[in-house]
Amino acid sequence: MKRLHVVGCHRSGTTLIFELLTTCFEHEAHCEHEKTVFNPPEDHVNALYLSKKPSDITHIHRVFRGDPDLYVIYMMRDPRAVVTSVHPSRGDVYFSSFGRWQRYEHAAKPLKGHPRFLEIRYEDLVREPDAVQDRIARRFPFLVKRHAFSEFDKHARTSGPAEISLRGLRPVSDTRLSGWREHLPRLAFQVQRHPSLTAALIEHGYEPDDKWLSILEGVSPREQEYGEKRPPVWQRLETDLRYWLKSRRYLRARFEEDTEEKKRRP
């Protein structure tokens, strides 16, 4: 079984790319909305399984390098859009901070360039969905196209949670790329809390310099502590240990599957 798994910071387009993949490429099965890579499919799958769990990027390294049938798509998005994005289920709460965006990007960096790891920019996806689809198909040639990404809304059958996150079924569109400009108080708070946001924009090509900061002049920051605080050190160590054990179990099970498969071969 091959598994194509979607990761990336929350509010970076992981739901959109997952729904595009499940609608527009042939596959045997997929998870309903989210399923960590450390959990196997609900039913036995022999061909291709599609899944998504944004936060897996922070703990996926050992299993990714150890499983030659695991493929990953990582979503990248302008951090200004990420930190100013609200989830439709809680319209008064910003779900992601720049600190989270930065941690996820730091976790993804060592895997970039690996032939089974593909970074997709949200901005490219919504501007040229079919070109991005072709790029995905070239990188992962086992994928068989069923529909064009640009016709996604005509064929999609999304889950309830996904439809809420996407704000309903609609064509892929780039009309909201500058939506972060409507949330300048939130952005002013994030720049105040995380000054390195500006350098990240330049590093990743979203801005040539820091002149864009002029739009924040005179803007009063809107503070929000939700999602800002990281767990204490002891809790992060406990999480790292838990995922290390999960990785061992995953790779052991993968080794046993390979062994059984070799025994069945003539």
Image: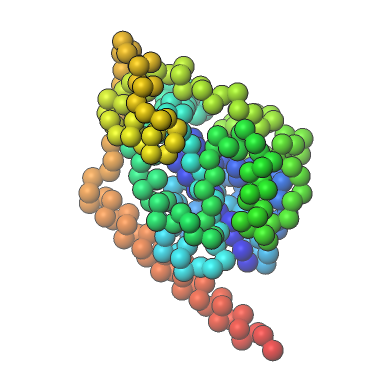
Q: Is residue 83 above or below residue 26?
A: above
Number of marks in the rendered image: 0
In this picture, is 167 found above or below 14? above
Kindly indicate the quadrant of the structure image that contains residue 175.
Answer: top right
Horizontally, is 125 left or right of 199 in the view?
Answer: right
Quadrant assignment for the N terminus = bottom right
**Is residue 258 shown above or below 42?**
below
Q: Residue furthest left?
A: 233
Question: In the rendered image, is residue 241 in sight?
Answer: yes
| Residue at the bottom extreme, as displayed | 266
User: In the picture provided, is 167 more to the left or to the right than 67?
Assistant: right
Residue pictured at 54% horizontal, 37% vertical: 122
Question: Visible in this render: residue 82?
Answer: no
Which residue corresponds to the image point at 53% horizontal and 60% vertical from the top-left? 115
Q: Nearer the viewer, residue 223 or 209?
A: 209
Which quadrant is the C terminus positioned in? bottom right
Q: Position of residue 247 (x, y in %)?
A: 42, 65
Q: Is residue 191 left or right of residue 150?
A: left
The residue positioned 34% from the left and 26% from the top of the image is 210
Considering depth in this image, is 248 or 144 the residue closer to the camera? 144
Looking at the image, what colour scheme do you see? Answer: rainbow
Residue 202 sits in quarter: top left
Where residue 114 appears, as percent x and y from the top left, is 49, 60
Q: Is residue 1 above or below residue 29?
A: below
Q: Residue at x 36, y 22 (%)?
A: 211
Residue at the front extreme of this rendering: 208
Quarter of the image holding residue 167?
top right
Image x and y of residue 185, in percent = 36, 17
